[in-house]
Amino acid sequence: MSTSAAERAPGVAPGDGFAARARGLTKAYGTGETTVLALDSVDVDIARGRFTAVMGPSGSGKSTLMHCLAGLDTVSAGQVWLGDTEITGLKDQELTRLRRDRIGFMFQSFNLIPTLNARENITLPIDIAGRRPDGEWLDRVIDTLGLRDRLRHRPAQLSGGQQQRVACARALASRPELIFADEPTGNLDSRAGLEVLGFLRESVDRLGQTVVMVTHDPGAAAHSDLVLFLADGRIVDEMRQPTAESVLERMKRFDMSRAAGKD
Ligand SMILES: Nc1ncnc2c1ncn2[C@@H]1O[C@H](COP(=O)(O)OP(=O)(O)OP(=O)(O)O)[C@@H](O)[C@H]1O
């Protein structure tokens, strides 16, 4: 008999107000002496309708956290919920369906299909799922992202910023409960990067989306509502209403305390 998430984790209410949550999330890679503890019993709540940034030094577990929250990777211990669905323990097929129906992804490489035009790229995940796009929503996304006059262009005919906007529209097209963005501005010049961050911000403010973004860039994190700081597989701090300066300052302190710890 399966036990409900709430029964197994006392005090944890169903996912009201949270797009995703984790309790005791632990991820180890490898076995024996070569084991790497990428996540060490992480508790995290991702608020609905908010823009959350995840920062931390290289190797601190940012991507692993994102992959485990998105059901792209299995966990070693702990529980993860998307809304009020516990995803830890779901079978591959159920996870694939859940990701397809409820999550949007944006990666550093845009992963656009070169032979499809912008509009076809945007609706591809919906088409693959065999669903019909919600025309009104799609129009809003396309207009919010300023892509109306680029829909018939193929990726090669678009600038890097425009391609990333198409990738953003594709992530939003199915109106997912949650968008995960892994370094979405990593390959862009600063102007195009700012554009993408502005669009992610607008998707939260104007379209009510929930966004989780992994980034190394304090300037990018400043577009979020909340920054989670990871170190050695743990969430060690958080910051509301961040500015680039306050995030940079926090990271410097962090580097200093790490250096002190190694002495
Ligand atoms: N498939 C894997 N096999 C073995 N170890 C891994 C694997 N994936 C990640 N790790 C290790 O887990 C730790 C966390 O990695 P992760 O990629 O989550 O860090 P990150 O904070 O996203 O790093 P970066 O900022 O460099 O992308 C690192 O020590 C990494 O080497």
Image (cartoon, rainbow, N blue to C red):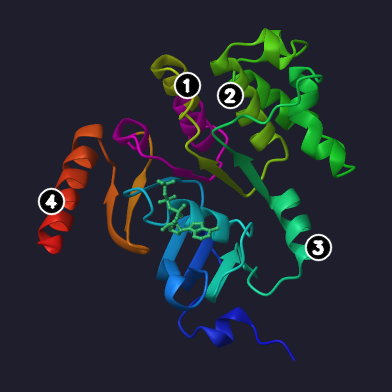
| Image: magenta residue range | 197-222
Q: Is residue 63 above or below residue 248?
A: below
Give the mark nearer the N terminus: 4 vs 3: 3
Q: How far apart are the two marked residues, 2 and 3, measured between alpha carbons?
A: 29 Å
Q: What residue type is labelled 1?
A: Leu
Can residue 100 be found in the magenta stretch? no
Q: Mark 1 points at which residue?
A: 188
Q: Does the residue labelled 4 lie within 8 Å of ligand 1?
A: no
Residue hosting label 3: 93
Specify which label sits upstream in the sequence, 4 or 1. 1
Work out which residue is located at the far right of the displayed protein and give it. 130
Q: Which residue corresponds to mark 2? A: 164
Marks 4,3: beta carbons within 8 A: no
Q: Residues within 10 Å of mark 1 (few under 14, many from 20)?
A: some
Please provide percent x and percent y for residue 41.
41, 73
Along the line of sight, the residue nearer the viewer: 163 or 35: 35
Q: Secondary structure under badge 1? A: loop
For disc 4, the neighbor class at 10 Å (few under 14, some 14 to 19, many from 20) is few
Whole-angstrom CA distance, mark 4 to mark 3, is 45 Å
Left or right of 31? Residue 239 is left
Check disc 3 and report its element: helix, strand or loop.
Answer: helix
Q: Say which element carries label 2.
A: helix
Q: Tell me the distance, in whole angstroms, between the alpha carbons under discs 4 and 2.
A: 35 Å
Image quarter of the N terminus:
bottom right
The reply to whether the C-beta atoms of the residues labelled 2 and 1 are less than 8 Å apart is yes
Question: Which of the numbered marks, if any, corresponds to residue 256?
Answer: 4
Ligand 1 is within 8 Å of the C-beta of the residue at disc 3: no
